[in-house]
């Protein structure tokens, strides 16, 4: 009886994560405001900006968009994996990937998004190479490479773990050709 009560309490504690996902939605509003500021700055200075300035403005918007997408992935995948399933039937434009990302997929999508965001930061630094020190540029590239290597190692580890746990990936079954007679 005590064990059942403890298990019920522990199972119910997953709902303590729900406010974190709500706070991530609020954080997205902050990103939206920043994207609005970047867009306004980008548009108002477009006529006098150099090509590099335009590219940097676009990269800033891409960076904010990738960050927002990353937050969406974390919100929906985290909620579905750790809190509760969302009824997709109630939403006619439900994206195909939602509800299909397990914890391993979530980790890999997170790392790949972080690598993409990091790559944009490095590209932005290269675009303004005259205003950044060699030391800072070296740190940015080093940190980016660390993200890349970490992502590769995580993907390889997950692949090796799934193969050792579940055996080698199944070979596709060849299709049988119809008998012409």
Image (tube, helix red, strand yellow):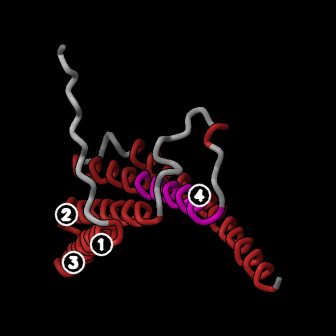
Residue at label 1?
164
Q: Earlier in the sequence, mark 4 or mark 2?
A: 4
For the residue pair 154 and 178, the one nearer the viewer reads as: 178
Residue at label 4?
80
Is the magenta region chiefly helix, strand or loop?
helix
User: Cβ–Cβ below 8 Å for labels 4 and 2?
Assistant: no
* CA distance separating discs 1 and 3: 32 Å
Instruction: Answer with left or right where residue 125 lies relative to residue 76.
Output: left
Of circles 1 and 3, the one toward us is: 1
* CA distance separating discs 4 and 2: 39 Å
Q: Magenta span covers which residues?
A: 65-83
Instruction: Answer with left or right where residue 19 lies relative to residue 53.
Output: right
Of circles 2 and 1, the one toward us is: 1
Q: Secondary structure under badge 2?
A: helix
Q: Earlier in the sequence, mark 1 or mark 4?
A: 4
Q: Secondary structure under badge 3?
A: helix
Residue at label 3?
142
Where does residue 94 sit, x and y in percent of width and height? 55, 39
Q: Secondary structure under badge 1?
A: helix
The quadrant of the picture occupied by the N terminus is: bottom right
Q: Which mark is residue 100?
A: none
Q: Quadrant of residue 115?
A: bottom left
Instruction: Answer with left or right where residue 91 lies relative to residue 35.
Output: right
* CA distance separating discs 3 and 4: 35 Å
For the residue pair 161 and 149, the one nearer the viewer reads as: 161
Of circles 1 and 4, the one toward us is: 1
Q: Earlier in the sequence, mark 3 or mark 4?
A: 4
For the residue pair 173 and 93, the one nearer the viewer reads as: 173
Q: Which mark is residue 126?
A: 2
């Amino acid at each position: 009886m005590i064990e059942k009560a403890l298990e019920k309490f522990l199972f119910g504690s997953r709902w303590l994560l729900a406010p974190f996902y709500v706070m991530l939605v609020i954080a997205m509003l902050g990103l939206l405001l920043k994207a609005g500021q970047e867009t306004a700055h980008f548009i108002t200075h477009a006529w006098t900006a150099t090509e590099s300035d335009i590219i940097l403005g676009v990269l800033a918007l891409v960076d904010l968009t990738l960050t927002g997408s990353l937050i969406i992935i974390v919100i929906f995948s985290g909620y579905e994996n750790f809190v509760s399933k969302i009824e997709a039937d109630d939403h006619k434009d439900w994206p195909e990937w939602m509800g299909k990302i397990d914890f391993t997929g979530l980790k890999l999508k997170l790392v790949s998004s972080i690598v993409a965001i990091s790559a944009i930061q490095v590209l932005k630094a290269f675009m303004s190479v005259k205003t950044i020190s060699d030391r800072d540029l070296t740190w940015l590239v080093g940190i980016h490479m660390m993200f890349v290597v970490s992502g590769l190692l995580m993907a390889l580890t997950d692949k090796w773990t799934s193969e050792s746990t579940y055996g080698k990936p199944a070979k596709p079954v060849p299709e049988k050709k119809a008998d012409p007679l």
